[in-house]
Amino acid sequence: MSTRLESASPATASPATARALRQLRRHGGLVALLVLVLVNIAITPNFLQLQTLFVNISQVATIAIVAIGMTLVIATGGIDLSVGAVMALAGALAPLIFLSPFGVAYPALGLVAAFTLPLLAAMACGLFNGFMVSVLRVQPIIATLILFISGRGIAQVLTNGNLQTFSNPSFSYLGTGRILGLPFQGWLALALAGLVYWLVTRTLFGRYLLAIGGNERAARLSGVPVRRVKFGAYVICAGLAGIAGLIVVAINSASDAGRNGNLMELDAIAAAVVGGALLQGGRAPIFGAVLGAVIIQLVKYTLLANGVEDEVALIAKAFIIVVAVYLQAGRRE
Amino acid sequence: MGDATTFDLRRYVRGQAQSNAVWLALMALIAFGLLRYDNFGGAYNIVSFLNYNSMFIVISIGMCFVIMTGGIDLSVGSVAAFTSVVAAYLSPWGIEVALPGGILAGIAFGAVNAFVIILMRVPPFIATLATMLAAKGGALVLSGAQTISVDWGSNFTKLGMEKAFGVVPWTIVLVAIVALAAWFVLERTSLGRTVLAIGGGEDASVLMGLEVDRTKAFVYMLSGACAGIAGVFLASGFGAGQPLEGVGWELSAIASVVVGGTLLTGGLGSVPATVAGALLLGLVFNILNFENGRGTISLSAYWQLVVRGGFLFIVILLQNRVSSARAAEDH
């Protein structure tokens, strides 16, 4: 109630500023992107080069893929803290599989298994999260905290905490391949975004998803299968995190369970929120999340390329998250 | 409507069973340890166990207050890391300066949390997540990304080693004071009752004319102060301000609070049970260490994460029975 009063008062004070503020909220992401690009052109050396584009696309793809899944979960009014741990788990499994005796004996089969089994494991994590949230009705923060803690632990136990290096060109294509000269994972992220966008806007699942986020009780009373839809959101989110985990491993030709996907949950949540997702649910701007991921990555790159220390970059990220959520909060009505 | 009193009674009994479950589990683990290991009940193990866990107990008490209002504070670990650096810089002036300095630094972060949550209306989860990043960045900037060794000449490092009245280390005395004060505030003051009322129903509390905003500001600053104390303990106990410490502390604290039977939805909670929850979690690892030492099992450090997550899972399953029963009554 008080939120409405606060945001209504500037409207009476000065319609022009209120309109400007509303426009900023609606197109804040694009404005931020434009500003970032202009600032970079002005201050970052060698910004307008293809190499810069490639580096940023290959980095942004993983953030975008995870952020898309996070957007689905946030649309139900939930949150998934376990995405980074799921990335580590999926990333740890893949090399284990194609480096195993079976994978060495049957390279083709091993490769297929190295893609499918980690994704199945990731989706199993999603099933666990979905079970905790929709059947046991545990708060999403706490429910996904369990795998946030132990998921990375399992990955480290599996690999004994070792860095697994490998040389497998077919697997590495996921992270180093090019289509039309652009990194493969960039195309993959776009394709996945398109698929999930279709899911949200054109299917019953998408309608139900938004209905649950809008008002869960109303959705349940009008016959929406709330449990199943929530299961779906968490499983898709975990599956996408699994794909991102595989990409990271493919880029490095090495799997480090301790670092793969570390702090990814923050980037993904920030990207989703910057892209226009409301934390209380009811909105699933998929391409907004991709835009958010691009912004987050560009901020990182800007600070890094201009020699700003990582520590200060953390503070900048904190600031961006708070401002984005603050602007979102005003958009509620 | 006539059943209202029986429902309340049932809820009361459930609540009692829940908080007593912590104590029962704690006693069972202690008995197990005493019977199985020779040195378990020795003064050395007890003192070092309490000394090490004092940081987590203090943080859990602050977290307990935040969770009782229905909020959460994810920044405690980073804030403790920050204040450990602050305390290390202040250590030449002795504990008399370093402890208040660390607490003030913690309160400052709590005030930032309170500002962002109450005035900017950002959800506690996001606000404290941002503070977690900012405090970590701040700690690294302040320390130049290095551990800051303390001044061994002053009385700063005596906190964990010197014993009050020759019996108990000062850290444990301080933790006891914090716990008693928190318990008193929660059970015997209107401030404590308001904390519980907010968790029970924030809108209703506002309509009743309770000082909701001021009370919420209090709990986040209290949590910051507790993290500040933990940071001072960290610097004093390990002889250095450690900007990279504190990772995952918020999870341990949340787990302790949950194990202590505090509902994550707020409105119900207990300080002694939270302390018991923190002790219980610490004891699980103490016993795992003893088992590793005996050679019956050999678990790498990575298993600790798995065990911790599994433990949290079990606790949530147990607590779920209580809270879902409560939710069923509410609807």
Image (tube, helix red, strand yellow):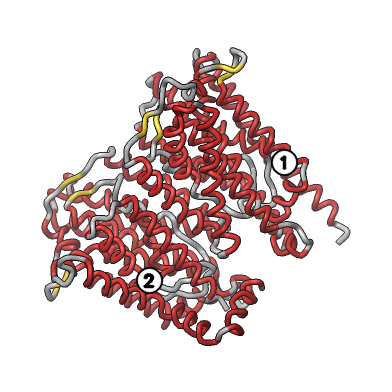
**Residue indicated by mark 1:** B185
Give residue B275's quadrant in the image.
Answer: top right
Q: Quadrant of residue B167?
A: top right
Q: Tell which of A9 and B58 is nearer to you.
A: A9
Front residue (pair B148, B297):
B148
Which chain's residue wears label 2?
A
Residue lying at 41% horizontally and 45% vertically, measured from the top left: A150
Residue B182 coordinates in the image, percent (x, y): 67, 38
Q: Secondary structure at mark 2?
A: helix
Query: From the viewer's perspective, is residue B203 above or below residue B28?
Result: below
Please name the amino acid that badge 2 sits on.
Answer: Ala
Q: Tell me: A220 left or right of A80.
A: right
Is residue B96 in sight in this rendering? yes
Name the residue: 38% across, 49% down.
B137
Of B133 and A186, nearer the camera is B133
What kind of residue is marked 1? Answer: Val
Residue located beneath label 2 in the image:
A289
Please identify the quadrant where the C terminus of chain A is shown. bottom right
Q: In screen coordinates, is B175 left or right of A303?
A: right
Which disc is residue B110 wearing? Answer: none
Q: Is any atom of residue A236 visible in this view?
A: no
Residue A132 drawn above or below residue A178: above
Residue in the foreground of this view, choosing between B295 and A146 = A146
